[in-house]
Image (cartoon, rainbow, N blue to C red):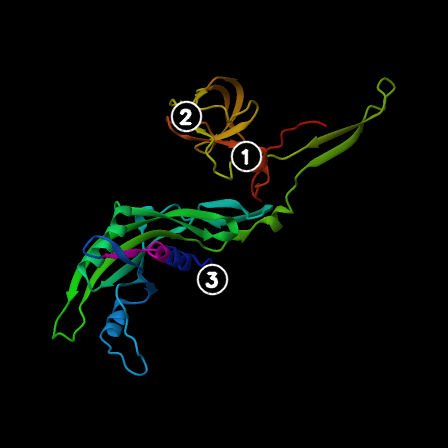
Amino acid sequence: MFEYFYHEILRRTIISFGTLFNGIEIQHEDSDDNVVSTIRVPLAYGPTQKFLARLQQSPDLNKPTSVTLPRMSFEFTGLQYDGSRKVTTTQTFKSHTVGIATAIRKTYMPVPYNMSFELSVFTKLNDDMLQIVEQILPYFQPSYNLSVDLVSTIGEKRDIPVIIENITMEDDYEGDFTTRRSLIYTFRFTAKTYLFGPVGDTSAASKDLIRSAKIGYVVGGTTKTPTRDVTYSVVPRATKAYDNDVTTNLSEDMGVEGTLMEVNDSSGIELNTYVIVDSESIYVDKKSGNKLVVKRGQDGTTPTAHVSGAAVNKVTATTNSLIEIGDDFGFDGSFI
């Protein structure tokens, strides 16, 4: 615990959020509805109070120009744990290191957190403000999915919902004619992101795993049986679907003693392979369309009832590369 790691998840989410509003423009027209100017609204990171203070400053020799409007600013304002998206804390998943298929990394499931943001829009004219607002609101109903590369080392990229919570409006126009008018709209958002712990490297441990075994011995040698060398070769296979890729789903309920398994699509399941349904290992013996004749409770698992819609995960040769220490293997006893 407390080993150093830094995935830059919060930083990446903040940058991605700001990018959403970095290309907004407004247009000004003359009396004949001809566009006379197009202004790109500048966006900066910082609190609203900072820009309000700068708006109230008068130009002087040190600052010959004041802050121009329209302008936008955004700020990361809070972080809160979201228990409604919690998953089992001890559950883990594995993935390959980006660019290295044989390098396997293991990490615990991410922890859900809600990030709070405020986007402030400053304008002098109502029409400027309305142009900006109409370029933002149609995308949030009430959420917009923001694709964020959360952990680049394992290629963990997720769609983060950004939800608009509320909008407040303020017309700061008090005082005499020398006071600058500023309309201020504040948009509040919540981004439902995930925080990952340290990513373990299992490649070193994987080097200690037995990938194959050969046994050679001599049989015979009696007066009736000639001496001959016999070699048995066995290759361990995975007994779990480590990658958690759903191959298909059950189309019908399956009882404890049932040997007929019906699925939505059997095209991805071959004969003489194993599948995992609700932690039960099942051997596929025969296949006819989307109906599979199976052998239940393989690799020490216990047959249990499964309901329609349950995920069916195929154990493939690729899964064998993800075998971890502690798996009891499943020597298939094949001969060479």
Residue holding disc 2: 250
Residue holding disc 1: 239
For disc 3, the neighbor class at 10 Å (few under 14, some 14 to 19, many from 20) is few
Q: How many labels does the image show?
A: 3
Does the magenta run of residues contain 22?
yes
Q: In which quarter of the image is the C terminus?
A: top right
Q: Indicate the amino acid at tag 3.
A: Phe
The CA span between labels 1 and 3 is 32 Å
Q: Are marks 1 and 2 in contact (CB under 8 Å)?
A: no
Q: Indicate the amino acid at tag 1.
A: Thr
The extreme bottom residue here reads 61
Name the N-terminal-most of marks 1 and 3.
Answer: 3
Q: Are marks 2 and 3 in contact (CB under 8 Å)?
A: no
Residue holding disc 3: 2
- Give residue 21's position: percent from left, percent from top: 33, 56
- Boundaries of the magenta span: 17-29
Element assignment for label 1: loop
Q: Indicate the amino acid at tag 2.
A: Leu
